[in-house]
Every structure is written in C-alpha cells, then in structure tokens.
Amino acid sequence: MSTQGSTGKTGRRGRRIRNYALGTIALGAAGIGYAAGIERRHWTLRTEEIPVLAPGSRPIKVLHISDLHMLPGQRSKQQWVAALSELKPDLVVNTGDNLAHRQAVPSVLRALNPLLGVPGIFVFGSNDYYGPKPKNPARYLMPKGRKKLIHGLHLPWRDLRAALIEHGWLDLTHVRRTVEVAGQQVFAAGVDDPHLHRDRYADISGEADRGAALRIGVTHSPEPRVLDPFAADGYDLVLAGHTHGGQLRIPGYGALVTNCALDRSRARGLSRWGANMWLHVSAGLGTSPYAPVRFACPPEASLLTLVARDERPGEVHKATRRKARTDVR
C-alpha cells in the first residue's frame, strides 16, 4: 500500500515536470515564432522633437533611415520605406547597412526612390561592404572585444553609392559640407564605419561651422571614440545606427547588447552626449538573414522634427518623444 502511494506521487510529479517542460517549450516556440514571423515585419515610425536648431530657425524635418539589410524579395519593407515620402521630410539621413545580398541594390533603390528627390546625406556600414555570413547566435551576446570580425562576400556598395550620388545625395564619408535644407544652412560631416575601424576622424576634425543653423554628424556605429570628438568640435546632433536597438530586448530591462562600445541605455532613440550634443540611434529596419528575429524591438525609421533651442539662460532643454506608430499615412 505504501509502495503504491509512492508510485502514485512519483507519477504525478513526473506528469507535472513533463507538462511544465512542454509548456516551456511551447512558450519558447511561440516567442521565436513571434520574433521571427511577426515583429521583424512590424514596420514602425518613431517620432521625436529635438530643440537643436539655432534660435529663430524654422523647424526642419529629418527622416533617419538605417540598417535596411535588404534582400531582393523583401517587398513589404520596400513598400513601407517608399511610403515614408508621404511624411514630406526636408532631409533624409541614411546611416548605412543597406545591403544583405549581392543583388539587393535595385531593391534598395526601389525602396528609396520616392525619397531621392529630397536632399539626402549618407555613410556606409559594414554590411554595405561585406555580405552576411552564418554565425553562432551566441556570438551576438559576447562582449564586443572578444568578437573576431567575420567578413562575407564583397557587396556592390560602389554601385549603390554611384546611384545615390547621381540622384543628388551626398556621401559624407570623411567629408565636411554645408548643405541647404528648407532654406537654411546645415553643416554636416561623417566618418566611415567605426565597426570596421575604417573611421578617420582626423580627416574632418576642427570646429564645426558656428554660423550654420544646425551642425550634424553622421556615423554608422555609435562608437564613443567617434562621438567624443564630434561633441568637442561643437556638433549639435549625431545620427547613427548599427545597434538594431539591441534587436532582442527584455521588457523592463532593455537591450541585452549594443554590438559596440556604446552603453545599453542608448541602444536606440535619443539621448544626450555631453552637455551640448544630442545622439540619435536608430534601431533600424532589418536583420541579418541568418538571425531574422526581433523581440520587443520592432524595425523602425525615425522622423525627427528639429526645432529652435530655447534662448532663455539656464533653461534645461528636453526633447519631446512622441508615440511610435506603424501607419505613415
């Protein structure tokens, strides 16, 4: 009788363990299915208002696009990006990683085509130069310093660059330029991808034009070693991508990693860098085809409305964050 009771308890305990395990597996499978099948296509527009222009300046609408990681067959992404032209931005800033396939240039241009009549500036990222390769997913969670860069096939970035320049967009790779945007002078400079150690800030070093309505810096990876000299040279705003916003975020905790030396709290969105410069990091619109998942971090483009700084002395300037939305119409 005692033996039967023990056997019954053991059987019930075994069923509970089995049911718990099955439930955990089902929950994990559902999470992976959501991250891979739903969220990574949940195209989202993030909007911010930033008090960054010279006093008395009219607002400037900047559309920030990054990390498309485009494959030729990604039609919904191409259509959604093309529809962003309905926002009527004054300036488009593309911070790189447009390509994920050797035949993706036409697809990127199809997505950007309605925006190519708008003034645009760009720099490239590692996945414009080199194609993706299969990697151990655990590498994503490793500290950046312990990762060895693994390059795939060379991608046709020169073809993409030529097409963007032909349409009037400016390649800011190690270049300083003044461009007219919405009737105002914008001083802009950029560096090549710090993730690949291609950045040469010395080529663009020196005080930014104090007479411009806006001084903007552009980089693919938001490495502190690049952000610090931008701030020291008097830039008002730096735009970057690369982090994918962490790509996998835990609600209440945030990004697990940034894939660079930037701290996790700045993995996406707007933050201060030093006393006088703003940093905006786009979570981007794509993923590697070998890691096609996003969780609590939908793919995004950002519409930044730049407004004049408050002239009152001692005023603490704060940006206004507006609710992200998926409908650009």
Image: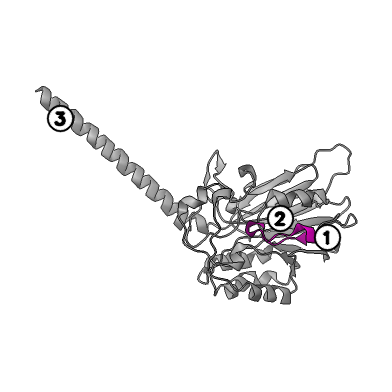
Amino acid found under the numbered disc labelled 1? Phe
- Asked if residue 71 lies left or right of residue 53, the reply is left
Res. 239 mark: 2
Three-letter amino acid code of the residue under disc 3: Thr
Q: Quadrant of the N terminus?
A: top left
Q: Please state, as top left, top right, bottom left or bottom right, where the C terminus lies in the image.
A: bottom right
The residues bearing labels 1 and 3 have C-alpha atoms spaced at a distance of 78 Å
**Quarter of the image where one finds residue 110:** bottom right
Q: Nearer the viewer, residue 329 or 99?
A: 99
Residue at mark 1: 187
Compared with residue 106, is residue 179 higher up or lower down, i.e. above or below?
Answer: above
> Real-space Cα distance between discs 3 and 2?
65 Å
Which residue is farthest left?
1
Q: Sequence order check: which comes first, mark 1 or mark 3?
A: 3
To which residue does mark 3 refer? 7
**Residue 44 on image: x %, y %:** 59, 55
What's under tag 2, amino acid-wise?
Leu
Q: Which of pointers 2 and 1 lies earlier in the amino acid sequence? A: 1
Left or right of 64, for residue 22: left
Residue 80: x %, y % from top left: 59, 64
- From mark 2 to mark 1, how far is it between C-alphas? 14 Å
Q: Is residue 195 magenta?
A: yes
Which residues are drawn in magenta? 185-203
Residue 89 seen in this snapshot: no
Q: Residue at x 46, y 50 (%)?
A: 138
Is residue 38 something one can see in this rendering?
yes
Residue at x 68%, y 72% (from the top left corner): 161
Q: Secondary structure at mark 2?
A: strand
